Image: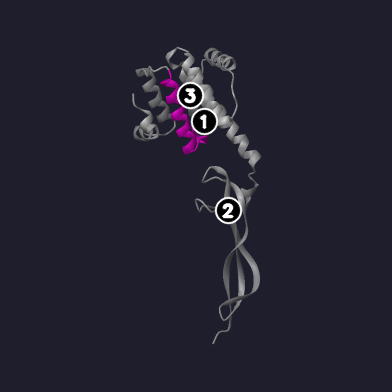
Amino acid sequence: MILFGAKAVTSTHAKGTFYCPGCDRDGVQYEHRRSRRFVTFYYLPLIPLNVLGEYIECQVCKNTYKVEVLAADSAEHRAVEAEFQLVIKRVMILMLLADGVVADAEIEVIRRIYQRLSSVDLPAELLREEVLAAQRDGDDVLAYLERLAPMLNARGKELVIKSAFLVATADEQFQDKERQLLADIGMTLGLTTAQVHTILGPMNRT
């Protein structure tokens, strides 16, 4: 009869909250899981030996990550979010310029969406200055997004599409040129026409 043996036992080493890349949000509960080899007696873990491995498990999406994921602190995450907010604002401005008309309603939509994303109340006068600067630079929304598309996740692409649509329809004149540009934006982001329609859903009543 074999009384002694060895086996790996996985247990929770610590718990806390972190920024989960899978959930794409901060403050998510995690468990720090550790696998260790034990000497067993009658199959019961008795003497701990070497650590075989450890990982972080998200308690929401259940994805697992290297322990280094905990080093991606909130400051780094906020920097990424701030950069993304600027991307959304730039896309909305370029979408506004697509029909050559800068309407007050479109300016207000950009202000409202940007404030929702960043909690920053951007004065209309400053926004108009940014619009004029983009007009002078001659930036193209598709060329801009082509450079950024590889850095955007699914949530980011969805927000780009929704924001561009809201700006295009703010003046209640969703022109064919704007429809085509929105479709082209989807293609540039690697989205199919069906995916774009799904993203817009009930928003697209025009």
In the foreground, 104 or 179: 104
**Of discs 2 and 1, which sits in the foreground?**
2
Q: Which residue is mark 2?
A: 30
Where, by quadrant of the figure, is residue 195 drawn? top left
In the foreground, 106 or 68: 106
In the foreground, 147 or 169: 169
**Secondary structure character of the magenta stretch overall:** helix
Q: Residue at x 59, y 16 (%)?
A: 126
* Vertical placement of residue 143 versus 133, above or below: below
User: Callout 2: few (<14), some (14-19), or many (20+) C-alpha neighbours within 10 Å?
Assistant: many
Q: Which residue is mark 1?
A: 148
Mark positioned earlier in the residue sequence (3 or 2): 2
Q: Which residue is mark 3?
A: 143
Where, by quadrant of the figure, is residue 199 drawn? top left
Q: Residue at x 34, y 26 (%)?
A: 205
- Picture coordinates of residue 145 (x, y %)? 49, 27
In the foreground, 202 or 37: 202
Residue 47 drawn in magenta: no
Magenta segment range? 148-170
Q: Amino acid at mark 2?
A: Tyr
* Vertical placement of residue 113 versus 26, above or below: above
Q: CA distance from mark 3 to mark 1?
A: 9 Å
